[in-house]
Amino acid sequence: MTGPVLILVGPPGSGKSTVGRLAAERLGVGFRDFDDDLERAHGLPAGELVVQLGREKFQESERELLGDLLPKHDGVLALGGGTPTAPGVPELLKGHHVVFLDVNLDQLLRREGLVPLHPWLLPNPRAHLRELLNTRRPVYTAVAATTIQTSERTPDDVLADVLASMPAAG
């Protein structure tokens, strides 16, 4: 199957972009952040796009863009936090090596810049993040071959586990 050698999923702030860049560098491939692709395609950050398009249209856009991107990108891809929950996306991910970067609520709340970057978490970031983790965790687990805990760990430690989870090169 063509497409990314590695796809990372998880909530905002779980380390997908940080670990994804490290993994791409180590594997000698390109890195893409799907939120950046969405922003390029629509001219607005993902958070603003959801508000402008509404959740249903936004998720349709995610699915279409991902369907176009998967066969063309052979590096590491970090998906947006909600992308795996879009209808049709779990089917698109089948056959790809997907890793769920899991993180606990307290750790997420300590990660700098998370709330300003995701204004929809206001006015109660703890309640919003708890709900987000509870509803998305089963989806992340279902689409991923492996779950790796990132709480209280360095990006290099997480990277080692991500690389260890990769299928052996045929």
Image: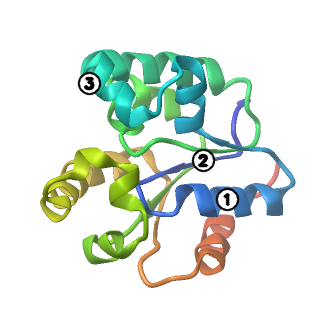
3D distance between C-alphas at marks 3 and 1: 33 Å
* Residue 129 in the image: above or below residue 55: below
- Say the numbered circle drawn on residue 55: 3
From the viewer's perspective, is 95 left or right of 58?
Answer: right
Judged from this view, the residue extending furthest toward the bottom is 152
Q: Specify the quadrant that holds the N terminus.
A: top right
In this view, the residue in front, 140 or 118, is 118
Local crowd size for mark 3, using a 10 Å CA cut-off: few (<14), some (14–19), many (≥20): few
| Place of residue 152 in the rendered image (x, y in percent of width and height, measured from the top left) | 44, 84
Q: Position of residue 51 (x, y in %)?
A: 28, 26
Residue, x 36% and y 40% (percent of image)? 82
Check if mark 2's residue and mark 1's residue have beta carbons within 8 Å: yes
Q: Are marks 3 and 1 in contact (CB under 8 Å)?
A: no
Looking at marks 2 and 3 on the same chain, the residue that comes earlier in the sequence is marked by: 3
User: Along the horizontal axis of the image, is 6 left or right of 15?
Assistant: right
Q: Determine the residue positioned at 51% across, 18% down.
A: 42
Circle nearer the viewer, 2 or 3: 3
> Disc 2 marks which residue?
97
- Report the mark closest to the observer, 3 or 1: 3
Residue appearing at x 73%, y 32% in the figure:
73
Q: Secondary structure at mark 1?
A: loop
The crowding category of the residue bearing disc 2, from other C-alpha atoms within 10 Å (few below 14, some 14 to 19, many at least 20), is: many
Q: How many marks?
A: 3
Q: Nearer the viewer, residue 53 or 165?
A: 53
**Reading the chain from its start, which is encountered first: label 2 or label 1?**
2
Q: Earlier in the sequence, mark 3 or mark 1?
A: 3
Name the mark on residue 166. Answer: 1
